[in-house]
Amino acid sequence: MIVILKKEATDAQMQDFVRQWKEKGYGVHISRGEEMTVLGLLGDTTKLDTETVAANPIVESVKRVTAPYKMAGRAFHPDDSVIAVGEGNNKVSFGDGFVPVIAGPCSVETEEQVVEVANAVKKSGARLLRGGAFKPRTSPYSFQGLGEKGLEFLKTAKKETGLPIVTELMDLRQLKYFDDVDLIQIGARNMQNFDLLKEMGKVKKPILLKRGMAATVKELLMSAEYIMASGNENVILCERGIRTFDTYTRNCLDVSIVPYLKKVSHLPIIIDPSHACGLRWMVPTLAKSAVAAGCDGLIIEVHNNPEKALCDGEQSLHPAEFDELMKVLPKIAAIDNRNM
């Protein structure tokens, strides 16, 4: 249930109103926008009479929310959420009209490799460094990542370049190694690992939640709801392609998710063109289309020697190719009065 307060309602009146509902067993989500303050009542509100709630003198209007994703939905939070990643001069924001690019190798292989790539992508304009230390792979015989050592290499690259780190968490037992990670990625295969999502709600770091390869948009938002309902509202959504009947690309990029999520949710949405197609030559075109569609960021795989990469080399851009792409993307963003 959504409760919109009158503009003249004081802080003291609002807090008293919130206290009354919490005493009745309801959770209350407070969203302060430029034009209004919105309270979301969480819990079984089916038996609540909207007229009774609206009778309070500080209430402007009351309406029921039919969407199952309450906290992730725009009804509870009319204004766009801005999620900050990193600290100090290296802090990057998603959702404020800026279009940050996350770039780096699919997996960390050596310290020299990840530092070299980090320097290259930063020079081209990337604002965050991606790199897999723990890798989920379809085959048990494939390279699974360097684990803790890989995170140490990412830390070295962060110290040298200042780029905030983005890397995937697969298991809660790995969380003890993530102190220096700025943005924790929950991958497509774990999008509906609900116990893991609940624990991410207790983490004081922003979460990058990737859409599962066979998940609906509603399921993606419900997964975000798990994190938010558990206490962490700093969630960035990521479209990385879904599985269809066709096989000419690795997955199928659902660009239409961008305008749809902009309508129904306040959370930032970024696009991963690398996993969406799995083909290096196609990545720049999909990246351009994503920016044109209004995405809040990109995450792109870049490797200094893709032909010898231990993971996903066929979809990784050479640093020179990434540099050329980064010269074009700001022109596309500028059409919509946004910056890269």
Image: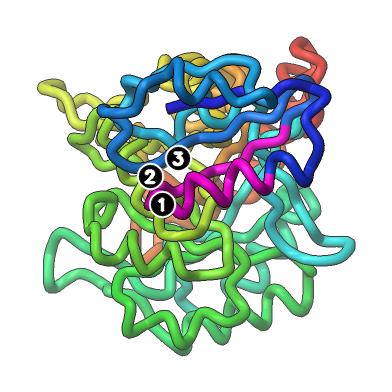
Q: Residues within 10 Å of mark 3 (few under 14, many from 20)?
A: many
Q: Amino acid at mark 1?
A: Ala
The answer to whether marks 2 and 1 mark residues whose Cβ atoms lie closer than 8 Å is yes
Q: Whole-Å distance between the Cαs marked 3 and 2?
A: 15 Å
Range of magenta residues: 15-32
The answer to whether marks 3 and 2 mark residues whose Cβ atoms lie closer than 8 Å is no
**Mark 2, residue position:** 225
Q: Closest to the observer: 251 or 192?
A: 192
Q: Is residue 25 magenta?
A: yes
Q: Closest to the observer: 197 or 15?
A: 15
Residue at x 55% of width, y 20% of height:
55
* x and y, in percent, of residue 251 in the image: 26, 32
Q: Is residue 157 magenta?
A: no
Q: Amino acid at mark 2?
A: Glu
Q: In the image, is 335 to the left or to the right of 180?
A: right
Q: Whole-Å distance between the Cαs marked 3 and 1?
A: 19 Å
* x and y, in percent, of residue 136 in the image: 26, 64
Of labels 2 and 1, the one closer to you: 1
Regarding mark 2 in the picture, which secondary structure is present there?
helix
**Mark 1, residue position:** 229
**Mark 3, residue position:** 238
Residue at x 48% of width, y 81% of height:
150
Regarding mark 1 in the picture, which secondary structure is present there?
helix
Mark 3 / mark 2, whichever is N-terminal: 2
Q: In the image, is 81 to the left or to the right of 305?
A: right
Residue at x 48% of width, y 86% of height:
177
* x and y, in percent, of residue 42 in the image: 40, 41
Image quadrant containing the C terminus = top right
* x and y, in percent, of residue 114 in the image: 59, 71
Image quadrant containing the N terminus = top left
Of labels 3 and 2, the one closer to you: 2
